[in-house]
């Protein structure tokens, strides 16, 4: 067993005897170079896919696989990459770079370009980068709270952790994971979204049931009801109602006082975890994640997040030239509205991603765009506001996945508290490195892409909506009408299930066969759990992780097809 002075260990992270070993640091020379290289790869893959195909690839599993392969090269200095914690830092960096470059920076910068204001691309890039950093900081400080618990589903995070653990331990786990990965990869060649089935094996059953219902209503609505429920702002109305209730539920969580030493609830199984320091039944003492982020810390984080988003909006207004084009009261209102929209956007997107692995960033951003049109915000300030808001959310969700993976890899380490804090801090630093690389890549390549008319499709939608308005005078009435069932379903489901938000998310996605795959996987999960008992969860985790990993690899491989 290594001594406390040893900087790292090659033993599996789950060993309860691994002692007070310090967590690997993102700034280690070799690891730092690897993180930069992986981040460049992730950023290029991200912007190429979002510009040419309109999709985003989850490259976290790709980064983990590359790190594992490097660790198997028989060279002394490369053996250090056998550490599951270094592999976790690698997947955190490449994943952060991918989503930052594609979903936050390039998409935001494309909005003023499509709008006909190329001179605002650089200011928008600066503003969206600030929003991205604040977005990630808020998640870093709030992950593990009762609002965003580490025990919740976060399916892609589970997939990344299971991939890393299977590569570390080998044997049957690796074989099951490999089988699932092959199936997921093959599915992409037949346009089957098997990642949807993988998520259904990992996420909250009630949340995913509503997600599957939403997917089915969107896909089969025209045949069943003679109308497309995805058109006419119906999903947006459901999301508005569910989102308002979700915010009210979040405020309730913030105002609630948890009894000292109380336990936490496992969002996937619905079982209560014991308080910090309590045995969980197998002889191991598992700390309550709430010991790291209590309600008071969460309140401070969200208030500071709003203050930071306000400061970022002020910077964007100044560099975007809004100071001379708006009155002082109008400018103050724009800044406060932009900050509130950014904070609300990231929370709703984060809650949906936490339960399902999907984040409805486009839909929620479009809601605030519509509200801006209703309020009467001028077109140029509205375009900048939409770019600022759209930069938040994806990185929030993605970092939640990465921190979930790290939490799973570190949860059995002893002593846990200090190691978890150190690991989470190093993951945040790895993500910041990925963001910086993404900024450089987008800054260098955006002109080449935009001048070739390679524009992210969602940016085109945002710009067209800002330019032409709603086009449907009854849009607001439709959204208010459908907000009622969305609010009711969200209220009935409660904070942990997010049923209204998930129903709206499903209504917004038109992916053939996704509904059938989600519902079929849920049925298999229920039946299999009755047959296998408690062992079913661990086995289905591996299958689900493999399906998500294979789909991610298939999505990343499409960069070759797009050339």
Image (cartoon, helix red, strand yellow):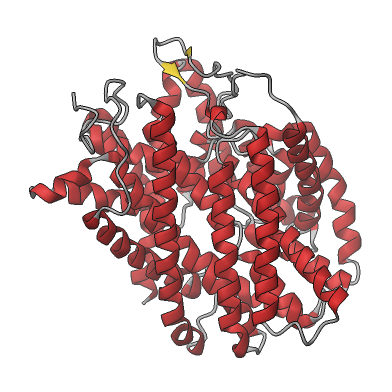
* Quadrant in the picture for residue 487: top right
Left or right of 93: which side holds 515? right
Q: Relative to 254, is 562 on the left or the right?
A: left
Horizontal side of residue 213 vs 452, given as left or right: right
Q: Relative to 338, is 418 above or below?
A: above
Does residue 505 show up?
Answer: no
532 or 382, nearer to the observer = 382
- Across and down, in percent, residue 135 comes to 59, 56
What percent of the width, then of the height, locates residue 483? 84, 50
Which of the two residues, 278 or 348, is positioned nearer the viewer here? 278
Residue in the foreground of this view, choosing between 467 and 301: 301
Q: Which of 344 and 102 is in front in this view?
A: 344
- Quarter holding the N terminus is top left
Residue at horizontal 38%, vertical 39%? 161
Please determine whether, in this image, residue 446 is positioned above or below residue 512: below
- Please, is residue 403 above or below residue 2 in the view? below
Residue lying at 89% horizontally and 55% vertically, measured from the top left: 480
Q: Determine the residue positioned at 79% across, 32% down.
A: 492
Q: Is residue 39 above or below residue 444?
A: above
Total numbered badges shown on the rendered structure: 0
Residue 300 screen position, x and y as percent:
67, 44
Pick out the residue farthest to the front.
5
């Amino acid at each position: 067993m290594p001594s406390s002075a040893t900087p790292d260990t090659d033993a599996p992270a789950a060993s309860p005897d691994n002692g007070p070993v310090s967590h690997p640091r993102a700034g280690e020379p070799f690891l730092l170079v690897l993180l930069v290289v992986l981040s460049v790869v992730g950023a290029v893959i991200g912007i190429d896919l979002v510009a040419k195909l309109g999709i985003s690839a989850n490259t976290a599993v790709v980064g983990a696989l590359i790190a594992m392969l490097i660790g198997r090269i028989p060279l002394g200095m490369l053996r250090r990459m056998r550490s599951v914690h270094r592999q976790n830092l690698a997947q955190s960096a490449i994943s952060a770079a991918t989503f930052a470059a594609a979903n936050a920076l390039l998409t935001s910068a494309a909005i003023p370009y499509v709008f006909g204001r190329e001179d605002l691309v650089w200011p928008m890039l600066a503003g969206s980068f600030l929003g991205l950093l604040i977005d990630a900081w808020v998640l870093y400080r709030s992950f593990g709270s009762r609002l965003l618990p580490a025990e919740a589903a976060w399916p892609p995070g589970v997939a990344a952790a299971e991939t890393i653990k299977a590569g570390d331990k080998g044997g049957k786990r690796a074989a099951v994971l490999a089988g699932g990965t092959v199936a997921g990869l093959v599915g992409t060649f037949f346009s089957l979204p098997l990642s949807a089935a993988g998520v259904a094996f990992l996420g909250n059953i009630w949340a995913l049931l509503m997600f599957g219902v939403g997917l089915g209503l969107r896909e089969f609505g025209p045949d069943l009801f003679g109308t497309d429920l995805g058109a006419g702002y119906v999903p947006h109305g459901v999301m508005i109602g569910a989102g308002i209730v979700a915010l009210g539920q979040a405020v309730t969580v913030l105002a609630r006082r948890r009894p000292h030493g109380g336990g936490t609830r496992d969002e996937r199984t619905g079982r209560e975890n014991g308080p910090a320091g309590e045995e969980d039944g197998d002889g191991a003492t598992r700390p309550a994640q709430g010991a790291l982020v209590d309600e008071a810390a969460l309140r401070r984080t969200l208030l500071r997040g709003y203050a930071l988003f306000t400061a970022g909006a002020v910077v964007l207004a100044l560099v975007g030239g809004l100071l001379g084009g708006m009155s002082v009261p109008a400018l103050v209102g724009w800044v406060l509205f932009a900050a509130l929209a950014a904070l609300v956007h990231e929370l709703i997107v984060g809650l949906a991603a936490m339960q399902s692995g999907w984040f409805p960033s486009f839909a929620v951003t479009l809601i605030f765009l519509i509200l801006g049109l209703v309020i009467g915000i001028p077109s140029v300030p509205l375009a900048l506001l939409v770019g600022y808001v759209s930069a938040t959310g994806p990185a929030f969700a993605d970092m939640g996945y990465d921190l979930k993976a790290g939490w799973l890899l570190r949860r059995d380490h002893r002593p846990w508290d200090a190691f978890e804090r150190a690991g989470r801090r190093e993951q945040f630093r790895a993500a910041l490195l990925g963001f910086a690389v993404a900024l450089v890549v987008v800054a260098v390549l955006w002109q080449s892409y935009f001048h070739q008319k390679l524009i992210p499709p969602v940016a085109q939608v945002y710009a067209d909506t800002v330019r032409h308005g709603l086009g449907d005078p009854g849009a607001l009435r439709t959204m208010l009408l459908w907000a009622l069932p969305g609010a009711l379903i969200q209220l009935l489901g409660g904070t942990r299930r997010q049923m209204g938000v998930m129903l709206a998310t499903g209504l917004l996605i038109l992916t053939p066969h996704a509904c059938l795959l989600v519902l079929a996987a849920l049925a298999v999960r229920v039946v299999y759990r009755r047959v296998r008992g408690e062992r079913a969860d661990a086995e289905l985790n591996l299958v689900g992780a493999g399906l998500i990993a294979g789909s991610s690899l298939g999505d990343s491989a499409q960069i070759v097809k797009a050339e």
